[in-house]
Each structure stands twice: as structure tokens, then as C-alpha cells.
Amino acid sequence: MEDEWCIHYNDCPVVKAYQKGIIDVDWLDIYCRSSWQECARIQLEESQDYGLELLLPDGSIEERLKHIELFRY
């Protein structure tokens, strides 16, 4: 049976952190392949009526960000 990768694999900051050598491959093996539905980022996104773009580093939500076009680097 072929592994099923996360639907956000290509855009996920966790994957990018691994590619830059910041985190260990175990994170990808555990959460990005097969059991990606258990990922806290996926669960948070699916359980809330806002996207992760409104989530501040301290876990609070900034509603005003809805009205700002964010630039991607």
C-alpha cells in the first residue's frame, strides 16, 4: 500500500523546516505521511471558522488580519 501524504505537504512550514535542517525527519514520518489527519495544524484549521493566517504566534487570533492582503515571500 502506498503512503498517503498530507494534502498541505507542499505548503506546510513543518516540511520547509525539515528541508532547511531545522527539525528531524521523524515529524514528517509521523505526521505528514499516512496519519496526517492527526496533525494539530490540520485539526485546528478544520475545527475553527478561521484560517491559520489569523493565528498569531502566541495562539491568539487577530480578526483584523482578515482585511489585509498578506504578501508571501
Image (cartoon, grey):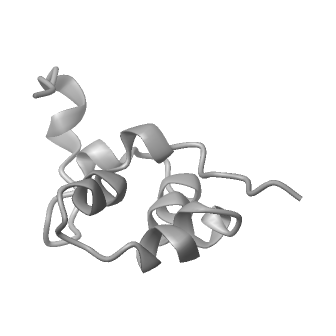
Number of numbered tags placed on the structure image: 0
Q: Residue furthest right?
A: 1
Quadrant (top left, top right, bottom left, bottom right) of the N terminus: bottom right
71, above or below 52, in the image: above
Residue 4: horizontal and vertical position, in percent? 73, 53
Instruction: Please state which of residues 43 and 60 is positioned toward the viewer in this rendering.
Output: 43
Residue 72: horizontal and vertical position, in percent? 15, 26
Residue 69: horizontal and vertical position, in percent? 16, 20
In this rendering, position of residue 49 left or right of residue 62: right
53, above or below 13, in the image: above
Q: Residue at x 11, y 23 (%)?
A: 71
57, above or below 20, in the image: below
Instruction: Please state which of residues 52 and 15 is positioned toward the viewer in this rendering.
Output: 15
68, above or below 21, in the image: above
Query: Quarter of the image holding residue 70?
Result: top left
In this rendering, position of residue 6 left or right of residue 69: right
In this rendering, position of residue 47 left or right of residue 57: right
Quadrant (top left, top right, bottom left, bottom right) of the C terminus: top left
Q: Residue at x 22, y 44 (%)?
A: 63
Q: Residue at x 59, y 51 (%)?
A: 6
Query: Quarter of the image holding residue 22?
Result: bottom left
Instruction: Please state which of residues 69 and 20 is positioned toward the viewer in this rendering.
Output: 20
Instruction: Please state which of residues 24 and 62 is positioned toward the viewer in this rendering.
Output: 24
Residue 43: horizontal and vertical position, in percent? 56, 64
Q: Residue at x 29, y 52 (%)?
A: 13
Query: Quarter of the image holding residue 37?
Result: bottom right
